Amino acid sequence: EVHLLESGGGLIQPGGSLRLSCAASGFSFSSNAMSWVRQAPGKGLEWVSSIGGSGSAFVTYYADSVKGRFTISRDNSKNTLYIQMSGLTVEDTALYYCTKQTGYSSGYFDYWGQGALVTVSS
Amino acid sequence: DIQMTQSPSSVSASVGDRVTITCRASQDISNWLAWYQQKPGRAPQLLIYTASAFQGAVPSRFSGSGSGTDFTLTISSLQPEDFATYYCQQADSFPYTFGQGTKLQI
């Protein structure tokens, strides 16, 4: 059974940094593309970043809203996905979901974690 | 970026009703489209991908259709557990984008 468990969320001041982790189990982690999708309170879904699976040389992609501030990475030996967030603003306040994609480069999110809440506030 | 526009934004319906939600892409995305269901306080769940393929054990009352720029999600006979928010998402190209959501309520 697939499990995705995010950690690392919390309250952070504007301009601060935070790293979210996502521990994955129940599937071949290194083979699958993974992504972060966020949802601001009461709002819709926003794709944040993706990292490809082993078939795509782990290529990374970012939404314009986070490019240059966020860095996605993965440790296949630990079956863990990360996102390092810096220069945080109040607009980054959201529930951050770790998602598994349906293949090494597919754009469909077939499993989601329960989310990690990031609150950016002074 | 590809813009995804859903309609309606919300819809009131009753158990047993047939409901159709539409999603329009700002450019041709072939059939690279998914539909997700999100219930309050829960993570979204993938229902349909490549416009019409079911993910897992999705009930047969759900169906998806369309290609190019216009897509629909139809629920043939609403059940109480179907009241939720539905999102479309294009998987044609980065940045992946979602529709604004359609809230299905009683």
Image (spheres, coloured by chain):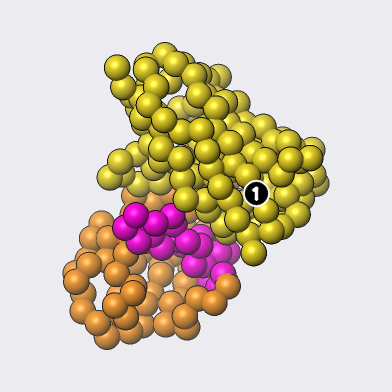
Chain colours: A yellow, B orange
> On the rendered structure, is A114 left or right of B6?
right
Residue B39 part of the magenta-drawn span:
yes
Q: Is residue B23 above or below residue A65?
A: below
Residue A97, horizontal then vertical, whole percent: 49, 45
CA neighbours of label 1 inside 10 A, class few (<14), some (14 to 19), many (20+): many
Residue, x 28% and y 45% (percent of image)? Answer: A42
Residue, x 51% and y 62% (percent of image)? Answer: B46
Quadrant (top left, top right, bottom left, bottom right) of the C terminus of chain A: top left
Q: Chain of mark 1?
A: A
Residue A51, horizontal then vertical, whole percent: 66, 39
Please state which amino acid type lies under the numbered disc 1.
Answer: Ala
From the viewer's side, name the closer residue of A101 and B49: A101
Residue occupying the far top of the picture: A15
Q: Which region shows up in magenta? A: B34-55
Tag 1, which secondary structure? strand
User: Can the viewer see residue A31?
Assistant: yes
Residue A31 part of the magenta-drawn span:
no
Quadrant (top left, top right, bottom left, bottom right) of the N terminus of chain A: bottom right
Residue occupied by mark 1: A24
Location of residue A41 (image quadrant) = top left
User: Can the viewer see residue B32?
Assistant: no
Residue, x 71% and y 44% (percent of image)? Answer: A79
Residue B45, horizontal then vertical, whole percent: 47, 61
Q: Is residue B79 above or below residue A113?
A: below
Location of residue A121 (image quadrant) = top left
From the viewer's side, name the closer residue of A116 and B92: A116
> On the rendered structure, is A111 left or right of A41?
right
Residue B24, horizontal then vertical, whole percent: 40, 56
